[in-house]
Amino acid sequence: MLGFRRRFLPDNRAARLAWVLLLAGVFGPLHALPVKADDMAAEIRALKKKLEDFDVIKARLKELEEKVNGQASHEHKTHIVHVHERPQPVHGTAAPQNEASAQHVHIRDPFGAAHERVPVTTPLPINQLSGHYTFDFNGIRVTPGGYVDLDGVFRSKNLASDIATPFNAIPYGNIPLGHTREFRGSSRQSRASILIEANVSPVTHLAAYGEFDFLAAPQTANTNESNSFSPRIRNLYGTVDWGDLGLHLLAGQSWSLATINHNGIMPRDEYLPQTIDVGYVPGFVWTRQPQLRLTKELMNKELWISASLENPATTFYNVGSTPWGTAPLPPTLLYMTQGGSLFDAQNQMSINHVPDIIGKIAYEPTVFDRKTHMELFGIYRDIYTRNQFANHDVAAGGIGGSLIFPIIPKTLNLQLSGLTGTGIGRYGSALLPDATIDPNGAVSPIPETILFAGLTWSPTSKLDLYGYGGEEFERATYATTASGLAYGYGNPLYDNRGCSTEGAPSTTCNGNTKLIRQITGGLWDHIYDGPFGHLKFGMQYSYTQRFGFVGIGGAPKTDEHIFLTSLRYYPF
């Protein structure tokens, strides 16, 4: 006992007392274990009564919680508006456009009549902005958009190019690079957009739209280590819509008026190819450039007329080489210059002083019980040079049209478009030259025709299929002096003898392009569509041919097989 005491009990008297009380608290109640049955039954009844009271309280709390949530939801909806619950529009305005299959789903929405400016004090949870929501701030509606993507491209002939294919640069056999293959991954086509709308009055509506990607390529951009690339402007413009007058004004950088629309003539409603290749398809007519556009709707929005002043630029082919040399250009000729302030000095720019002028009429009749979209447009261009101490202007331009016909409404669409004229090369995806130079330094616009056709098919809500074909071809425009000096584009005296020999000098393969054509097809699989956005996977294959004009040594030709993939997440 003494050993136990020395080992387990402290020497301090107060501490010993505490230890004894602790043991008594643990073992003392053991004598009470044998209790009477009726006492235990009473205790059980008391516990049951407490549980019943708890269930009543729990039900009451749930009722109060549902009431509070209902009030909060009502208050929250005064600040956040679901897309599908928007009021009917007063005039036509489209929501921000997502590409791929979403390009052909268009939401017209100026959010109805004028409303009071209500200060917003409730924070907007980000999950409720994803997928389906816009939000209001002091009477101004804001709609985010865009996607994050990873693209992959494989080419049978190396172009050292990212996700946009330069179709007019597909190499002939003399270029060693053309005998190698190319694979490239890229996230640079990822996109961010924002649409801001406001109703000034019941009939006057303002909007601003910006859309950006990362396909800019400054001098320092490369894929060696950090893959750091700059953002660039795709679209950045403002609009004013007068609903009572049916007038729409656009000012800023947008798709050219020559680009096909899906409904009427409204921004963010262009009918673009669904291709992964952001160079689109040879034969597709488009540019994006600063412009001032005015549109008028007539006949209850069945007829639209529009005119646009757009930023000019001219692409030239100056002169080629012959087996006996290259013809000189007049020393006083000025048609290109280095970039100046806020332009890259390494880039050559054309000199221009008159904007491109484009007019368009869109008509939407009902044909075979189907709403059909038709367009007719014209382009006027001024090509500007200085030679022999004087300025010179040469007129150019063309006429074009387009058609969208729903073979099976909302399922299968046919698309046709074309443009023909002179000096219109930069309006086609292949970017053939606009003009060339005569022996005396005068400008000659090059005749060209641009054609495009396509089918888009959505057999289910989860799958979009497409197939396109197009071509761009130019007519030879040249002159030869009495002494045998060859000028122009497509001159039969140009040297093509080395176009099939790897490593041959470039002077032995002029290879002026006569025709570029392509067929392509692909799909977009909707992996997920829900309240948290959209996840899509796409594949595309294209086959492109490039044919040159006949010269000394024959007519060169080449082709390119391209396979592309894309995985895109649209959070908005």
Image (cartoon, rainbow, N blue to C red):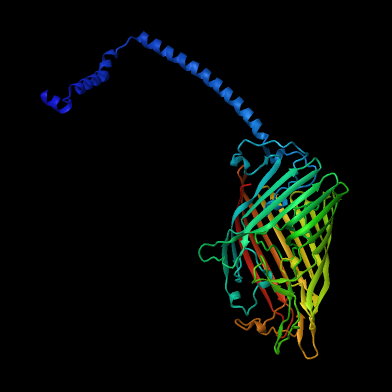
Residue 203 drawn at (x, y percent) = 81, 42
Furthest residue toward bottom: 483
Figure disc tally: 0
Above-or-below relation of 189 to 62: below
| Residue 127 in sight in this render | yes
Identify the image quadrant of residue 501: bottom right
| Residue 491 in sight in this render | no
Q: Nearer the viewer, residue 350 or 155?
A: 350
Above-or-below relation of 208 to 520: above
Above-or-below relation of 150 to 319: above
Q: Is residue 412 left or right of residue 33?
A: right
Residue 17 drawn at (x, y percent) = 21, 20
Identify the image quadrant of residue 32: top left
Q: Nearer the viewer, residue 466 or 305?
A: 305
Taking the spot 46% from the left edge, 13% from the top edge, the residue there is 49
Taking the spot 52% from the left edge, 21% from the top edge, the residue there is 58
Q: Which quadrant does the N terminus fall into?
A: top left
Q: Is residue 473 left or right of residue 145?
A: right
Furthest residue toward right: 299
Residue 465 drawn at (x, y percent) = 68, 55
Above-or-below relation of 122 to 413: above
Q: Nearer the viewer, residue 104 or 357?
A: 357
Residue 165 drawn at (x, y percent) = 65, 66
